[in-house]
Image (cartoon, rainbow, N blue to C red):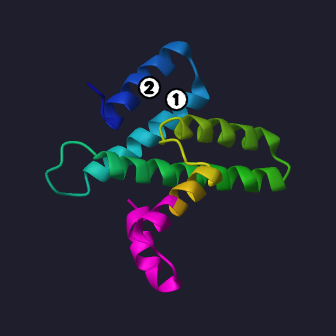
Amino acid sequence: FSMNITERINNDIKTAMKAKEMAKLAALRDIKSKLLLELTKGGDATEVDETTGIQILNKLYKQRAEAAKIYQEQGRTDLYDEEMAQAEVIKAYLPEQMSEAEMKASVEEIIARVGATSMADMGKVMGIASK
């Protein structure tokens, strides 16, 4: 039994409220609002599917990281720290990314499996790699 992303966020909001973790609470509320916005876009979906949820989380994480970078360039460490704290909260809900070495090994294994020998075989390799 695994909870969907919305249930996890709602439970974690309650936990953060009880623990008075304000930065975490702000990030979780932002995630929740974006998930609710996605639900109200139309259709009869009663919950956001995992793929859409991950896309939303990725977008939020990138926004936080970009904002943090700008604050850092402007010497606003207070705002930088806040954005990075929220980015870390969001990152916790994203699937773990493959390292470059893992990615390279995986692609090399696919190349060997499909017998790719030239750039003409790139489509076959990319088709499998993107799954």
Labelled disc at residue 2: none
* Left/right of residue 85 with respect to residue 112 in the rendered view: right
Q: Camera-side residue: 35 or 95?
A: 95
Most common secondary structure along the magenta stretch: helix
Q: Are marks 2 and 1 in contact (CB under 8 Å)?
A: yes
Question: Which image quarter is the C terminus in?
Answer: bottom left
* Residue type, label 2: Ile
Q: Element at badge 1?
A: helix
| Residue at image point 44% right, 24% down | 12
| Pointer 1 residue | 25
Question: CA gap, disc 2 to disc 1?
Answer: 6 Å
* Left/right of residue 101 with respect to residue 10 in the rendered view: right
| Residue at image point 49% right, 13% down | 18
Q: Residues within 10 Å of mark 1 (few under 14, many from 20)?
A: many
| Residue at image point 39% right, 43% down | 33
Tell whether position 127 is magenta. yes
Mark before the other along the chain sequence, 2 or 1: 2
Tell whether position 17 is magenta. no
Percent coordinates x, y for residue 98 in the rendering: 56, 48
Q: Camera-side residue: 91 or 2?
A: 2
Q: Residues within 10 Å of mark 2 (few under 14, many from 20)?
A: many
Q: Which residues are magenta?
A: 109-131
Percent coordinates x, y for residue 78 in the rendering: 78, 38
Q: Camera-side residue: 6 or 77?
A: 6
* Left/right of residue 55 with respect to residue 25 in the rendered view: left
| Pointer 2 residue | 13
